[in-house]
Image: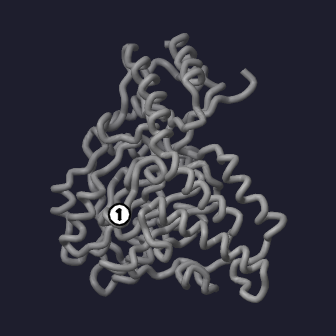
Amino acid sequence: MSQVIYFDNNATTKIDNRVLEVMWPFFNENYGNASSKLHASGWIAEAAVEKARTQVAALLGAEPSEIIFTSGATEAVNTAITGIFKAYKSKGNHIITVKTEHKAVLDTCKFLEENEGAEVTYLDVNPEGLIDVENLMESIRPNTVLISVMAANNETGVFQPIEEIGQIARKHKVLFFSDATQYVGKMRVDLSELPIDALCFSGHKLHGPKGIGVLYLRRKSPRVVCLPLLHGGAQEGGRRAGTLNVPLIAGLGMASKIALNEMWDNNTHVSKLRAHFEHQLLEMEGITINGSTRYRLYNTSNITFPTKVNIKEFLREFAFSSGSACTSGTGELSHVLKAMGISEQEIKSSYRFSFSRYNTKEEVDLLLKAVFSRI
C-alpha cells in the first residue's frame, strides 16, 4: 500500500478544498492588513475577517461581537483561564476542572497554582470517563471563580453534561468555560441557549486550516471580563493583540459554514463507519471500548487490544494514535485513561481511531482485515 490510510482525525483533519479556495486569494492577491483603514486592500481584508466572524458565530449560535480569533485552541484556553482568573481575583482564587482535561487546561491551571496563588480542584471521573455532577456541586466554594470542563474528550470522545454543568455554574454565580475543540463541528452548539460563558475550538479539527482558533466570550447575562494574554495592539477590540491572519480566518469561516450546513449528513456517514468498525472488532476476544458508549462522539473509538498484541508494529499503513497528539512525544501514558482506572498494561495496548467524512467503508474494511489477520 503506497499511501497511509488516515484514521487520526481527532489530531487533525484534511482541509476541505472549498476552504483552500477561499483562503488562496488572501495570500497572493488581496494580501492587505485588516487593520489598514485608509485603502481598499485593508478594507477587503477587514471585510473577509468580519464575514468569517459572522460564519463562526452562526456555527456557535453566538453574536459576531463575542468571537475572538486566536492562533488556536491552546492560546484560547490560556487566555480564557488566565484572563478570567486574573479579572475576577478580587472575588476569589478557586478553579474547578477535571483530571481528564486536555493538557492545555491542566498545565494552565498548574501554572496558576504555582505562580498566581490559584487553588484548583481536579475532579475525578468514573470508569466511563464521566464526572459526578454532585461532586462538582460539592466542590464549589464561596471563592470559586471558574469551572473549566471540556465538552468532549480528545482521547475517548466522551462528552460531559455541559448544559447541566452550566446551569449549576449559573446557580452559584460562577463562570463556566468549556474547551469544545473536539465538539464544535460535530455536535450542535447553540450558545444562545447553552449556559456557557466562554468556549474555544480550533480550525484544523473541522477541516479548516491549522494555526487559527476561536475564543468565545459571552457579552451579556453575564458579560464576561477576560484580561488579554497578548498585548501590543488594539485588534479584536483590544482582547487579543496581533496582526490578524486573514487567509486562515477566511478559511475558518468557510469551514464553519460547511460544518453547519453539512453536519447531519456527515454525522450519519461517520456514525455508520464507526459502528461497523466497533461491531466487527467486538466479535473478537479481549477487545474493549474505553469510555461511555452512550455519551461519546460518533467519530471516536478508543480501543484496548489484547495486551500480547502490539498492533502499531503491524498497522504501519494506517494512521491512528495512542492518545493525544499534543503529548505523544513525551512518552507519558495517557492521563485520561489512567484517571478512568485503566491499568498501565492496558493503557499501553490502547489506541484511538477517529474517523471523518473523508473516510470510506472500504478503508475501514482494510483496517479490520489487517487487525483480523494478526489477532
Neighbour class for label 1 at 10 Å: few (<14), some, many (≥20)? many
Colour scheme: one colour
Q: Residue furthest top?
A: 373
Quarter of the image with the N terminus in it: top right
- Residue 362 lies, with reference to residue 195, above or below; the image says above
Which one is nearer the viewer's eye here, 189 or 316?
Answer: 189
- Residue 351 lies, with reference to residue 12, above or below; the image says above
On the image, which quarter does residue 339 sit in?
Answer: top left
Q: Residue at x 31, y 37 (%)?
A: 292
Residue 281 spot, x, y in % from top left: 43, 19
Which one is nearer the viewer's eye here, 371 or 338?
Answer: 371
Reading the image, the residue beneath label 1 is 148
- Residue 325 lies, with reference to residue 315, above or below; the image says below
Q: Residue at x 46, y 74 (%)?
A: 66
Q: Is residue 293 left or right of residue 15?
A: left
Q: Residue at x 41, y 46 (%)?
A: 335
Q: Residue furthest right?
A: 28
The kind of residue tagged 1 is: Ser
Which one is nearer the viewer's eye here, 197 or 252?
Answer: 252
Q: Residue at x 52, y 61 (%)?
A: 73
Q: Secondary structure at mark 1?
A: strand
Residue 180 spot, x, y in % from top left: 43, 56
Counting labels gives: 1
Q: Residue furthest front?
A: 261
Q: Is residue 296 left or right of residue 142?
A: right
Q: Is residue 262 left or right of residue 109?
A: right
Residue 56 spot, x, y in % from top left: 52, 63
Residue 221 spot, x, y in % from top left: 30, 78
On the image, which quarter does residue 362 sit in?
Answer: top right
